[in-house]
Image (cartoon, rainbow, N blue to C red):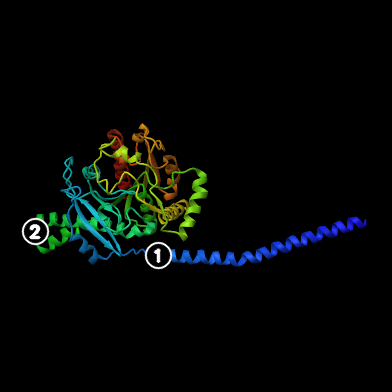
């Protein structure tokens, strides 16, 4: 009995020592934990203070100053025109394909049925003449925007194809859409005045007031699709009558553990080391499937759309993570949305022929699964044989993609009216 008491006393003593050590360790770690939380909060506050303040107001005087500086586009040539968009510290570029310029136009509409604005993807810019002609032929005025740091908008010394916040592009898209309307309106005013200029002032005034704003359509590709989705959620515009997203960047193309564990962890590390470079990720196989000098049929500026992805920093990783996380929580885009994606994906360091008929950048299945989180009125469409940029696929495939997109726009505008 005495032995049992001694054993019990020893066990109790050992338990007490362990609890005491645990308590002392907890007290020792507490200041470190508090400091870490304060440090994280301080960095989080600093990051929040850096995010651009998004205004829903468009300064018309500033807008008109952009419009009077329009010139012929040196990249695509006539009839394309370009206009600067200088908002805050950023420089973007609006590209115009004047309405009625298409050689394939089958009618002579006096006014466009709608205004289409196209937003490019990551490490990309607008160069698709065929897209402008297709949209114009369907009776829509076509515009595109090169966001700051991309294509025509890139400036020496500025980060190329970079992003710290998805919201830093919102005002450029906003001004681009409004500039498109004012350019269309100006052209319509000239046409109307030419027909009634010999009439009374009352008739002229009435004719001018009869000009109504056409419906707005937003088209976007890859990263531009992600940015545009958040833009639409932020601004909640009732006048965006249709949205077409071409292989939008709604999810990272990695395995489930990487997407759910490694990616969030890396995004957290980026909070402390935002400017740390992770080099150039990916391979050049997708570019080889596009470029005319390789396996593709498209000619473009390889400095603005390089074969190798540009140097990427952790703040871009965090920006994508935050944008996609917000989308996964559920956006509230009210406009009718068409999400188009390829029927297959390919991921190979070596060149394989599947790069000519599958998405060589993103996982088409993940795009399809994430699409409903954009809003309550989303339709998904699989384009078999499509590449990452469906509108740069083989002719029969991209023609089918264009037909589907334009038919969706026609039906959406008819339904909204």
Alpha-carbon span between mark 1 and mark 2: 52 Å
Please give left or right for residue 184 compared with residue 414 in the image: left
Please rate how many residues cluster around mark 1, counting C-alpha atoms within 10 Å: few if below 14, some from 14 to 19, many from 20. few
Task: Say if 239 sits above or below 378 in the image.
Answer: below
Q: Does residue 273 show up?
A: yes
Q: Where's residue 263, x and y in %? A: 48, 50
Q: Where's residue 202, x and y in %? A: 13, 63
Furthest toward the right, the residue is 1
Which dot, 1 or 2, sits closer to the camera?
A: 1
Please give left or right for residue 172 compared with residue 47 in the image: left
Residue to which mark 2 is pinned: 197
Q: Residue at x 22, y 58 (%)?
A: 182
Please give left or right for residue 123 compared with residue 259 in the image: left
Quarter-wise, where is residue 26 in the image? bottom right
Q: Does residue 211 show up?
A: no
Q: Residue at x 16, y 60 (%)?
A: 206
Residue to which mark 1 is pinned: 50
């Amino acid at each position: 009995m005495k032995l049992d008491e001694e054993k019990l006393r020893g066990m109790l003593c050992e338990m007490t020592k362990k609890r005491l050590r645990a308590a002392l360790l907890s007290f020792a770690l507490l200041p470190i934990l508090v400091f870490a939380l304060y440090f994280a909060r301080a960095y989080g506050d600093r990051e929040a203070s850096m995010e651009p303040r998004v205004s829903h107001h468009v300064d018309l005087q500033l807008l008109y100053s952009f419009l009077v500086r329009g010139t012929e586009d040196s990249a695509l040539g006539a009839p394309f025109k370009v206009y600067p968009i200088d908002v805050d510290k950023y420089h973007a570029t609006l590209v115009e394909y004047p309405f009625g310029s298409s050689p394939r136009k089958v009618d002579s509409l006096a006014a466009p049925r709608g205004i289409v604005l196209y937003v490019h993807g990551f490490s990309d810019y607008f160069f698709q003449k065929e897209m402008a002609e297709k949209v114009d032929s369907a009776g829509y005025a076509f515009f595109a925007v090169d966001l700051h740091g991309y294509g025509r908008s890139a400036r020496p010394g500025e980060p190329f194809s970079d992003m710290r916040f998805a919201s830093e592009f919102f005002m450029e898209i906003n001004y681009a859409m409004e500039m498109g309307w004012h350019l269309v309106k100006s052209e319509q005013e000239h046409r109307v005045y030419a027909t009634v200029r010999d009439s009374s002032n009352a008739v002229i005034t009435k004719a001018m007031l009869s000009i109504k704003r056409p419906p707005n359509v937003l088209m976007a590709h890859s990263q531009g699709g992600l940015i545009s989705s958040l833009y639409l959620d932020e601004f909640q515009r009732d006048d965006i009558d249709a949205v077409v997203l071409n292989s939008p960047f709604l999810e990272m193309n990695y395995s489930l553990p990487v997407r759910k564990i490694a990616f969030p962890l890396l995004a957290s590390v980026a909070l402390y080391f935002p400017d740390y470079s992770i080099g150039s990720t990916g391979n050049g196989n997708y570019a080889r499937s596009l470029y005319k000098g390789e396996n593709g049929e498209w000619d473009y500026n390889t400095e603005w759309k390089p074969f190798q992805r540009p140097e990427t920093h952790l703040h871009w990783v965090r920006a994508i993570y935050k944008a996609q996380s917000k989308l996964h929580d559920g956006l509230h885009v009210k406009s009718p949305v068409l999400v188009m994606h390829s029927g297959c994906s390919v991921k190979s360091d070596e060149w394989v022929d599947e790069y000519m008929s599958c998405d060589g950048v993103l996982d088409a299945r993940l795009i399809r699964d994430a699409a409903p989180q954009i809003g309550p009125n989303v339709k998904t469409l699989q384009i078999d044989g499509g590449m990452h940029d469906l509108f740069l696929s083989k002719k029969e495939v991209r023609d089918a993609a264009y037909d589907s997109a334009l038919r969706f726009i026609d039906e959406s505008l008819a339904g909204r009216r």
